[in-house]
Structure formats: structure tokens, C-alpha cells
């Protein structure tokens, strides 16, 4: 009976730890997104109030930077290897979008979209590995039983 209680207590502590790690990651990510959106909104508000003079259409080509910021936040605040992988994927996606919008190296959406499928497939494969998945703790617990 004592072994079952100890095992249940161990599992509940492990679950609480996983939830805490996930919540810290989400809180930091929300902080980065909130500050980024406030900054972008402030710039557009200043433009609308004629406090600064800028070409909003020229900024359109920079929108992939928001996705790159999201990826950097994933990497900086990563608690698990899967978060780093997700961040790298978002940065690569932002780079691809920017290169296609600016036609760098002759890249366009129509001639390079298969690259995204390949990158996404690699990402899915890597997330399925026990060492990079979000269920790393669960896999370790299962192997210790």
C-alpha cells in the first residue's frame, strides 16, 4: 500500500513540475508578444498622428520579423529541447518569407514552397524523437518503471 501512495505522490509532483515549467514558458512568451504588439501599435499610432513620417507600405515587407521575434522568444525562454526546435523553425520560416517578399536569390513563393514542406517534415520527425519531444519527462518516467 505504501508503494502505491509513494508512486502516486511522485507522479503528482512530476505533473505539477511539468505544468509549472509550461506556465513559465507561456508567461514569458506572452510578455514578449505583448511588448512587440505594443511597440508596433505605437509606431503605427505615431504615423497616424503625424508624429513621425514613414512609408507604411515599405514596412509590409518587414512583417516576417514578428515571426522571427516569436522564434527568438521560443529559443530564449526554452525549457525543453522541443521549444528550441520550434523557435528555429519559426526563424527559418521568417527568413524564407522575407527572402520571397524581397525576391532574394530569385526566390519566390511559387518556386520555393516545397522548401517549407521539407522543413516542416524535418521538424515533425525531430519532435517525434524521445529526446526532443514535449513528453520527455513522461518518456523518462515510463522507462524507469
Image (tube, rainbow, N blue to C red):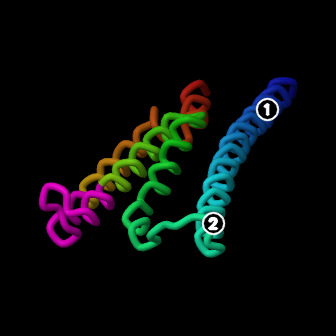
Task: Name the residue that disc number 1 marks.
Answer: 13
* Residue 63 against residue 4 in the figure, above or below: below
Specify the quadrant that holds the N terminus.
top right
Q: Is residue 140 left or right of residue 118?
A: right
* Residue 52 against residue 83 in the figure, above or below: below
- Sequence-wise, the earlier of marks 1 and 2 is 1
> For the point 44% across and 54% down, which residue is it?
65
What is the span of residues highlighted in magenta in the rendered image?
96-115
Q: Residue 55 versus residue 108: which sits nearer the camera?
A: 55
Task: Tell me which corner region of the image, top left, top right, bottom left or bottom right, holds residue 117.
Answer: bottom left
- CA neighbours of label 1 inside 10 A, class few (<14), some (14 to 19), many (20+): few
> For the point 19% across and 67% down, which residue is it?
108
Task: Name the residue that disc number 2 marks.
Answer: 51
The picture places residue 16, in percent across and down from the top left corner, at: 78, 38
Q: Could you give the CA–CA distance between mark 1 and mark 2, rounded to whole angstroms? A: 54 Å
> For the point 59% across and 61% down, which residue is it?
40
- Secondary structure under tag 2 reads loop
> For the point 14% across and 67% down, which residue is it?
111
Q: Residue 94 versus residue 21: which sits nearer the camera?
A: 94
Amino acid at each position: 500500500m505504501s508503494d502505491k501512495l509513494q508512486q502516486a505522490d511522485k507522479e503528482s509532483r512530476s505533473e505539477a513540475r511539468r505544468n509549472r515549467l509550461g506556465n513559465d514558458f507561456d508567461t514569458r512568451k506572452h510578455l514578449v508578444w505583448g511588448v512587440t504588439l505594443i511597440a508596433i501599435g505605437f509606431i503605427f499610432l505615431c504615423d497616424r498622428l503625424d508624429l513621425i513620417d514613414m512609408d507604411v507600405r515599405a514596412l509590409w515587407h518587414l512583417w516576417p520579423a514578428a515571426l522571427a521575434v516569436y522564434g527568438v522568444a521560443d529559443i530564449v525562454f526554452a525549457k525543453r529541447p522541443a521549444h528550441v526546435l520550434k523557435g528555429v523553425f519559426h526563424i527559418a520560416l521568417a527568413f524564407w518569407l522575407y527572402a520571397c517578399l524581397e525576391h532574394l536569390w530569385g526566390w519566390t513563393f511559387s518556386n520555393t514552397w516545397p522548401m517549407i514542406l521539407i522543413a516542416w517534415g524535418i521538424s515533425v520527425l525531430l519532435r517525434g524523437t524521445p529526446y526532443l519531444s514535449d513528453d520527455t519527462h513522461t518518456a523518462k518516467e515510463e522507462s524507469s518503471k
